[in-house]
């Protein structure tokens, strides 16, 4: 059985999750460069080099011969519950990093992203995700929820956006474009100063096009806090 690069990526990603490693850790242990590791795990490498697959498989304790022969596919299908279609992976960055984003920054630079996550929504190559902090956008968005930020979309009135203020802070609000001016709105009715005028020099990092909760990751975070 010929195995596609996408299936190899899915199988290796599942093993990576079992180990609880990041892509960077797998790259370090296997000796495969991090960008190459990412492309293979994301399924972007349609015909990944056999030696790289062997190195990744060995680091994860996977029989590479069985992997390449397709013998692990049935095991994978039996243990995975069908979920939303994965549209590729996106980097999760910190809010501090979002506040410092510029065209000169390469999100694919090894070690820049905090982690790479499977994304259930279509997105451009420049998209990234952030973890919601605080309750300013409740109840529509919950703390710990992941938001997909799409820089390639032109923001419009009533879009939820991530903006960078002149002092280099990233903020998540709903854009309001009115005859009186442009404002940022916090959705939480109990949030103080819900509506603020957009300061001169504010830049919009991107439009939020989707959100989801990584329950497994949230459980780990909660267990560390308890």
Image (cartoon, rainbow, N blue to C red):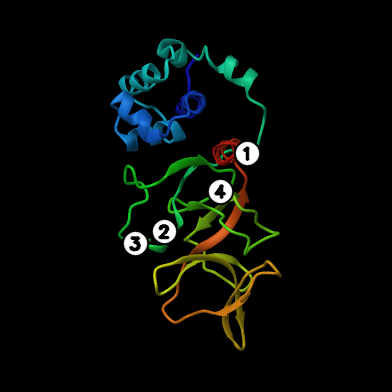
- The percent position of residue 20, horizontal first and vertical second, equals 48, 29
In contact (CB < 8 Å): disc 2 and disc 3: no
Q: Which numbered disc flags the more N-terminal residue, 4 or 3?
A: 3
Marks 1 and 2, how far apart in space? 24 Å
Residue position marked by numbered label 1 in the rendering: 215
> Disc 2 versus disc 3: distance between alpha carbons?
16 Å
- Residue positioned 50% across, 41% down in the render: 117
How packed mark 2 is, by other alpha carbons closer than 10 Å (few <14, some 14-19, many 20 or more), is few
Say which residue label 3 marks: 103
Q: Mark 2 points at which residue?
A: 96
For marks 1 and 2 on the same chain, the one whose residue lies earlier in the sequence: 2
Question: Could you say where residue 3 lies in the image, as x and y percent from the top left?
Answer: 48, 20
Q: How many numbered discs?
A: 4
Spot occupied by residue 72 in the image (x, y as percentages of width and height):
53, 14
Contact check, label 1 and label 3, Cβ < 8 Å: no
Q: What element does badge 3 sit on?
A: loop
């Amino acid at each position: 059985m010929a195995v596609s690069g996408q299936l190899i990526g899915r199988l290796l990603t599942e093993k990576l999750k079992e180990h609880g490693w990041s892509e960077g850790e797998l790259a370090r242990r296997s000796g495969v460069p991090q960008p190459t590791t990412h492309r293979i795990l994301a399924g972007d490498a349609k015909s990944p080099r056999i030696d790289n697959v062997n190195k990744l498989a060995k680091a994860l304790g996977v029989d590479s011969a069985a992997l390449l022969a397709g013998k692990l596919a049935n095991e994978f299908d039996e243990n995975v519950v069908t979920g939303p279609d994965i549209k590729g992976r996106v980097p999760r960055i910190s809010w501090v990093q979002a506040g410092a984003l510029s065209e000169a920054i390469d999100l694919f630079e090894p070690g820049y992203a905090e982690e790479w996550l499977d994304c259930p929504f279509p997105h451009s190559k420049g998209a990234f995700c952030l973890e919601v902090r605080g309750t300013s956008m409740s109840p529509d968005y919950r703390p710990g929820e992941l938001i997909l930020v799409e820089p390639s979309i032109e923001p419009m009135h009533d879009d939820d956006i991530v903006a960078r203020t002149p002092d280099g802070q990233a903020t998540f609000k709903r854009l309001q474009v009115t005859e009186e001016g442009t404002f940022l709105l916090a959705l939480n009715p109990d949030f103080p100063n819900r509506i603020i005028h957009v300061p001169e020099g504010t830049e919009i990092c991107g439009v939020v096009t989707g959100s989801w909760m990584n329950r497994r990751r949230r459980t780990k975070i909660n267990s560390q806090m308890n």
